[in-house]
Amino acid sequence: MAVLPNPAVVIGAGVNDLVAAHYLARAGYSVIVLEEYPSADTDIGWVPAKIVRDLGLEAHGLMVDHPDPWVAAPLPDGGRLELARDVPRSAAALARVSPRDASKWPEFCARMAQLADVLAALYAEPPPDPLARGAEEWMRLAKTALRTRWLGRRGMTDLFRLLAMPCADWLDDWFENDTLKGLLAAAGVAHIQQGPRSGGTAFRLLHQHAGSPPGVFRPPRSNLRRVLAGLPGIHVRHGAAVARIVVRGGCAAGVVLADGEEIATPLVVSGADPRRTLLTLLEPGSLDPEFARAVGNIRARGVAARVNLTLEHEPGFSTLVVAPSLDYLERAYDAVKYRRVSPQPYFEACHDGTDAAGRQRLAVHVQYAPYALADGKWDAARSAALTDTVVDTLAQHVPALAGVIVERNVFTPPDLERLHGWPEGQPHHAELAPDQAFWMRPLPELARNRTPIRGLYLCGPAMHPGAGVAGASGAHAARAILRDREGGKLAHS
């Protein structure tokens, strides 16, 4: 049995897990990070400035990709609609397809940026608890109320409407062009089993905008995980699978690895999804049955596959979105409602740098492809058919790519679960919807990163604020731990 001074174990080596680990190490813990599943080097999400400052990430080589144009979408009559980081440039591009939409674009961007700033402020702190008592909680609630009040009457109305309404309705209020509405709505449905006419998807669109400049509705990509993995102060053990979290007397006491090794510690921080952490890694009977049932009902439905293409030369775009209209997206969603793969999925193809041989990589998010199929299981034939759909569709819009693809790999939702530990292939660990957000993410009882087991905390993307805000869930977990330690609620040796 390994024994460390002031020990802490972090399960997982994703961005949130590593952020939590580094905050704890700087607070004096001896941190072991147990990595079972490898993660990608490119991370998606806005990195809050406080995390960058606290961990000195820029000095250690943090690079955030800000492509310009940030998105392109094929037009039905040929050519592409390209949106730039500069609002007037995007308006000029829109003027060629819809002068009316071009005139509305600056106002839309300003309005969305104002609302997204409210979310960004909420995401930088633990979620407010409307039922909590105490001066600190009342102050947090008061700050939230003031931020909302400062929006003014129209801004407050828009915010409350956005939290519940379909993104299709919101976009129809503003624009007429199908291509523009399709590429924006795609951000509102990414990684959730909903279509653009489902309630709450307007909130998802706003979430994707938080932390980005006006007019950019996709989170940036960065090398954050690679930088965090290279920072000193923590010990990362690769290929270390946790079989069980040890609990004694209602308190965390350590972890047991798959090879039988036990690491004793009163502090375990899990970046695994809540269902796996609380229902699989804990001994049966460790939790109240009603609470365990609620954990089992956390929605984490995987609806997207990934196709990686290796190219002989650059694709000629940074991100290409194939979601021609709101109707197209809704029809694609119709298939997954009945556990079928959409014959015309929405996808986003992102230029993902180069491989070791200097060849270009294209990462394609393919939605809607459900984890569980109504008529059998994912097999090689189904996977190949999905890849063919992506390649054939790309070739329609970028004919030059057809002859330069030298390698292609597909990862279905079951593949993503097996390779990365994502429940049902869901990378966010819990769908981000209004009923699983803020003080309800993923459940009200877990929203502050604490679990019913003393010394066991959650830090993964299922926690507030969710995926798309890189490292924030891990930072919140670390701060909760340190507050509990200062308040005498957590043992430290």
Image (cartoon, rainbow, N blue to C red):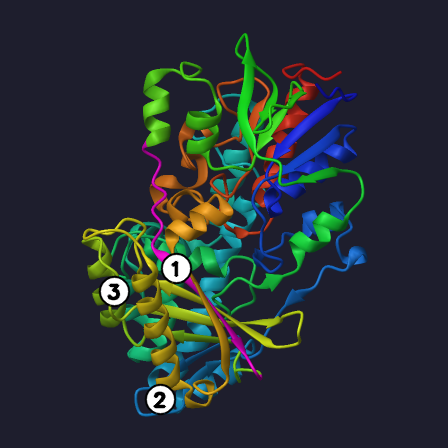
Q: Is residue 476 visible?
A: yes
Q: Identify the amino acid type marked 3.
A: Ser
Element at label 1? strand
Task: Name the spot of residue 8 as percent of width and height, x first.
Answer: 69, 26
Magenta part of the protein: which range? 297-313
Q: Identify the amino acid type marked 1.
A: Ala
Judged from this view, the residue extending furthest toward the top is: 249
In this picture, is 491 found above or below 201? above
* Mark found first going from the N terminus, 1 or 2: 2
Element at label 2? loop
Judge from the rendering whether residue 118 lies leftward or rightward of residue 33; answer left or right: left
In the image, which disc is placed on residue 342? 3
In this picture, is 236 found above or below 456? below
Between label 1 and label 2, give the one nearer the viewer.
1
Q: Identify the amino acid type marked 2.
A: Val
Between label 3 and label 2, give the one nearer the viewer.
3
In the image, which disc is placed on residue 305? 1
